[in-house]
Image (cartoon, rainbow, N blue to C red):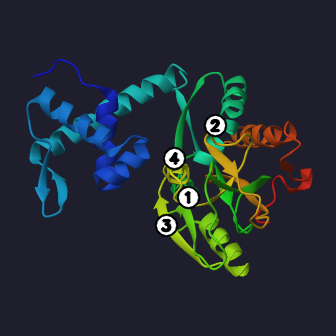
């Protein structure tokens, strides 16, 4: 049997008990489910006892698992009480979310701003689609996130607007009049996909989604392969290997918003929002929202 117990593994055990399952506990612990399962396996290996057993489709604590859970709670309480008495500040992690579209441009400035304002904090990033990130913020798993809002009606702080651009592969041949336009898009639900289909349909063009992906790289790969045209936001620069298709209608802009979880430290929220606004202020070709709109809810 091991002669020491990892405090983080014990916290994972308590989180599983309090959340009622592995999946929810992983979200609360800000770790992946495989990493959480590894915590459990390491505890079982070190203590040489089985902590969980299958109960139908779920997992439940064994008798030995309940004993270890009780000890884990006592150990954590003693540890945390000692820190409070010593007035030691626990390490703090700020979890930041961003869509793939804005990650490469906005996150570097955001990192610098957070490190300057909160030097004792660590930062962890979640890159994903806007709908998924908004849900993660709502659940409190992500502290704040920069998300796209093509409808202009979403919640959060309106930071700025990104132009929407039609992209094709170099040398791509456009469909002749009457032929179907192949669209490369994100899988549903996706506001950009709906915008592209609507614009092309309003122009009297027959459109077919020729390929779709859950990731930006997947969409770009489809366009580079010459499978069709894609409508994407631009935060500056053009994706390598692609051309702008100027023959299609102006698609306007999409809102970029910052959504924050309930209860987030006001200083963190202000710092993140200021970094987003500064990003647009330094790029006059993008659209900066008026100062009065930075904290507006909705559009």
**Residue shown at the point (12%, 55%) measured from the top left:** 54
Q: Which numbered tag is attached to residue 138?
A: 1
- Horizontal side, residue 24 vs residue 13: left or right: right
Residue of label 2: 104
Q: Secondary structure at mark 1?
A: helix
Kindly indicate whether the residue at mark 4 contacts the one at mark 3 (C-beta within 8 angstroms). Answer: no
Kindly indicate whether the residue at mark 4 contacts the one at mark 1 (C-beta within 8 angstroms). Answer: no
The residues tagged by marks 1 and 4 sit, at their Cα atoms, a distance apart of: 26 Å
The residues tagged by marks 1 and 3 sit, at their Cα atoms, a distance apart of: 33 Å
Residue of label 3: 210
Count neighbours of disc 4 (C-alpha within 10 A) and say few if under 14, some if 14 to 19, many if 20 or more: few
**Residue shown at the point (61%, 22%) measured from the top left:** 120
The residues tagged by marks 1 and 2 sit, at their Cα atoms, a distance apart of: 24 Å
Q: Does residue 264 appear in the picture of this structure?
A: no
Find residue 40 and report its image quarter: top left
Q: Nearer the viewer, residue 139 or 252?
A: 252
Please tell me whether mark 2 or mark 4 is closer to you in this view.
Answer: 4
Q: Secondary structure at mark 2?
A: helix
Please tell me whether mark 2 or mark 3 is closer to you in this view.
Answer: 3
Q: Position of residue 143 (x, y in %)?
A: 59, 45
Please tell me whether mark 1 or mark 2 is closer to you in this view.
Answer: 2
Count neighbours of disc 3 (C-alpha within 10 A) and say few if under 14, some if 14 to 19, many if 20 or more: some
Q: Nearer the viewer, residue 107 or 273?
A: 107
């Amino acid at each position: 049997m091991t002669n020491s117990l990892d405090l983080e593994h014990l916290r994972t055990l308590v989180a599983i008990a309090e959340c009622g399952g592995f999946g929810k506990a992983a979200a609360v612990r800000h770790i992946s489910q495989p990493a959480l399962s590894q915590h459990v396996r390491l505890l079982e290996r070190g203590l040489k006892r089985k902590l969980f057993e299958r109960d139908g489709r779920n997992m439940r604590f064994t008798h030995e698992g309940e004993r270890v859970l009780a000890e884990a709670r006592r150990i954590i309480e003693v540890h945390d009480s000692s820190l409070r008495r010593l007035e030691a500040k626990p390490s703090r992690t700020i979890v930041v979310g961003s869509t793939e579209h804005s990650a490469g441009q906005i996150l570097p400035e955001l990192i610098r701003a957070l490190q300057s304002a909160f030097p004792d904090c660590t930062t962890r990033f979640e890159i994903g689609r806007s709908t998924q990130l908004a849900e993660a913020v709502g659940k409190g798993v992500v502290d704040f996130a920069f998300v796209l809002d093509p409808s202009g009606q979403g919640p959060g702080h309106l930071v700025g607007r990104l132009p929407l651009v039609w992209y094709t592969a170099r040398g791509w041949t456009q469909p002749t009049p009457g032929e179907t336009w192949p669209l490369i898009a994100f899988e549903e639900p996706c506001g950009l996909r709906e915008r592209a289909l609507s614009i092309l349909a309003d122009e009297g063009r027959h459109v077919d989604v020729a390929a779709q992906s859950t990731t930006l790289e997947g969409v770009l790969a489809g366009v580079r392969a010459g499978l069709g045209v894609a409508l994407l936001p631009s935060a500056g620069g053009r994706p390598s290997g692609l051309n702008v298709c100027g023959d299609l209608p102006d698609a306007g802009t999409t809102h970029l918003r910052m959504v924050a979880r309930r209860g987030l430290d006001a200083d963190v929220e202000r710092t993140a929002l200021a970094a987003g606004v500064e990003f647009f202020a330094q790029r006059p070709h993008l659209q900066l929202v008026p100062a009065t709109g930075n904290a507006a809810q909705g559009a």
